[in-house]
Image (tube, rainbow, N blue to C red):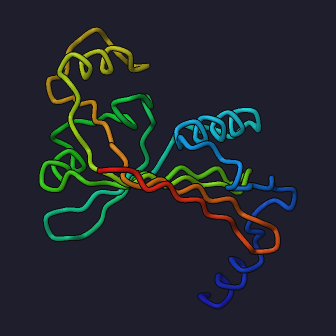
Amino acid sequence: MSEAFRRRLRALPDFPSDLAVFDPAIAPDDPTLLFKEWFEDALAAGVPQPHAFSLATVGPDGMPSSRMLILKNLDADGWQFASARTSRKGRELVGNPRAAMNFYWSALGRQVRVLGTVVELSAEASARDWAERPAADGGANPAWQLYSLRPVEIEFWQASPDGDHVRHRYALPA
């Protein structure tokens, strides 16, 4: 069974054959501008949930943990997401406030990695985010926290049909 599964996996295509060409030489100096451009490309291509990303944190035992979240905003405060402070990720961020985000748009052969320090945003911003959730019932959630990842590195990755994938990294001041 293992060998058959391995063959099945190897037979699947990695990426579409008609991928965009990415030239880092013409990328904007501001990585948020490039992210917003790629995000709009994902929307135009019909990528479901282009605002979804994997968030990786590390627990007190040093073991990484990841889960899917939704990007809430991207502004001068950073790359925003929310969760209950009492959740596993909330507890892990208290002990180690560093995390990594990964956006992946397979239809475009693109991913964006964002690494940095996570800070808690204000109680007011957190309450507003809770109230704006699709299932909001008007009640408060005192454990709800809006976080912001402040990047020290952002990497854009564009797949290429020939396997010569393109990476473009931005190193940012901490």
> How many marks on residues?
0
x and y percentages locating residue 83 in the rendered image: 28, 36
**Quarter-of-image position of residue 135:** top left
Residue sticking out furthest to the right: 18
Residue 133 placed where, x, y %? 39, 20
Question: In the rendered view, would you say 87 is above or below 124?
Answer: below
Left or right: residue 113 compared with residue 80: right
Q: Which residue lies at the image location 38% right of the left edge and 15% below the top edge?
A: 132
Q: Quadrant of residue 149?
A: top left
Left or right: 40 as drawn, with respect to 155: right
Residue 74 placement (x, y as % from top left): 44, 31
Q: Residue furthest bottom?
A: 3
Asked where in the image residue 141 lies, by quadrant, the reply is top left
Left or right, 7 with respect to 150, comes to right
Residue at 15% x, 41% y: name it. Answer: 86
154 and 47: which is toward the camera: 154
154 and 104: which one is in front?
154
Residue drawn at 77 percent across, 66 percent down? 160
The quadrant of the image that shows the N terminus is: bottom right
Examine the rendered structure and indicate whether residue 135 appears above or below residue 2. Answer: above
The residue located at (69%, 39%) in the rendering is: 42
Q: 33 left or right of 25?
A: left
125 versus 168 height, above or below: above
